[in-house]
């Protein structure tokens, strides 16, 4: 199995793992057709001098712009021809690149802290009963909340070990189990070094998976964050009204 990294705007590949390299946790080295540099993202404390930053790509494989969309083109390409991908990368000692975060969905909380929700989601998804997670916050709120879709195969057994019985549908409505799942997520967050303001303070359990069919995932299975926010607007408002900090 080989891993790579790229975007449509780069004619697909930018990096690729090489034969004989059996290490994991990275997307390989830059392809000969392009250059890659990392750019400071100060608000998230990523600095190129430390080998971390936004991945920028330049080369003959990089596109010239979006058709009849100068504004979007200017956002993606700088004056020197570097494509700003919105992904955060880290150089490893062997010259390979590791994807560690996402820049484009960063937002501020009411007290001014920057939040990278996908970084938090990638930690919480390691909780055994969690199949999908959407972390929400905005500049009018002081804390984060989450929408969790449990793993329908794992959660019943996980719940039973903790004294919870019932069908999958019943378990999804169990407030005590909901609290147990959130505590497990927060535990993983602490172990991964999340700050207190990066931890969710309340979650809603949703029994149905996010999917392309229900409009909550893209065809490449990435979360459609604006659609998720609108779809769960009522539940998000209820979560915020239930917590006072």
Image (spheres, helix red, strand yellow):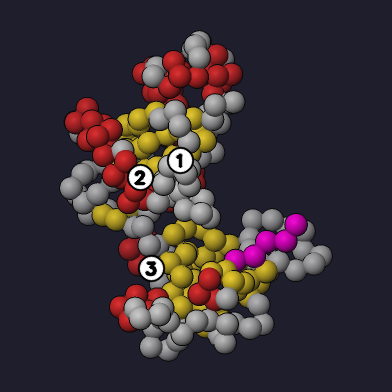
Q: Quadrant of residue 194?
A: top left
Q: Residue 194, labelled with which disc?
A: none
80 is higher (above) or lower (below) than 235: below
Mark nearer the N terminus (1 vs 2): 1
Residue visible at 26% across and 54% down in the picture: 108
Quick one: 234 or 34, which is closer to the camera? 234
What is the span of residues highlighted in magenta in the rendered image? Answer: 1-5
Q: Is residue 3 magenta?
A: yes
Residue 119 showing in the rendered view: no
Inspect the magenta stretch and tell me whether residue 180 lies in it.
Answer: no
Label 2 element class:
helix
Q: Which mark is residue 228?
A: 2
Residue contact at pointers 1 and 2, CB within 8 angstroms: yes
SS at badge 3: loop
In the image, residue 176 lies at what x, y percent?
39, 17
User: Residue 66 sits in which quadrant?
Assistant: bottom left
Residue wearing tag 3: 41
Q: Residues within 10 Å of mark 1 (few under 14, many from 20)?
A: many
Pinpoint residue 45: horizontal percent, then vertical percent: 38, 62
């Amino acid at each position: 199995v080989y891993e790579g990294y790229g975007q449509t705007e780069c004619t697909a590949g930018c990096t690729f793992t090489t034969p004989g390299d059996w290490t994991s946790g990275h997307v390989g080295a830059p392809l000969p057709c392009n250059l890659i540099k990392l750019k400071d993202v100060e608000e998230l404390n990523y600095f190129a001098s430390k080998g971390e930053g936004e991945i920028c790509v330049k080369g003959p494989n990089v596109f010239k712009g979006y058709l009849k969309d100068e504004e979007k083109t200017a956002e993606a390409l700088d004056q020197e021809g570097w494509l700003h991908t919105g992904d955060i990368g880290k150089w490893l000692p062997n010259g390979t690149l590791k994807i560690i975060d996402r820049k484009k969905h960063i937002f501020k909380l009411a007290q001014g802290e920057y939040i990278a929700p996908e970084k938090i989601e990638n930690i919480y998804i390691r909780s055994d009963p969690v199949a999908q997670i959407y972390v929400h916050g905005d500049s009018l709120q002081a804390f984060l909340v989450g929408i969790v879709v449990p793993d329908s195969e794992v959660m019943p057994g996980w719940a039973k070990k903790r004294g919870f019985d019932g069908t999958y549908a019943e378990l999804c409505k169990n407030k005590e189990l909901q609290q147990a799942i959130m505590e497990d997520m927060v535990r993983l967050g602490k172990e991964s070094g999340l700050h207190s303001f990066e931890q969710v303070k309340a979650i809603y359990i949703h029994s149905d998976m996010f999917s392309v069919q229900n409009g909550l995932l893209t065809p490449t299975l990435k979360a459609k964050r604006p659609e998720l926010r609108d779809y769960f607007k009522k539940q998000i408002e209820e979560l915020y009204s239930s917590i006072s900090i």
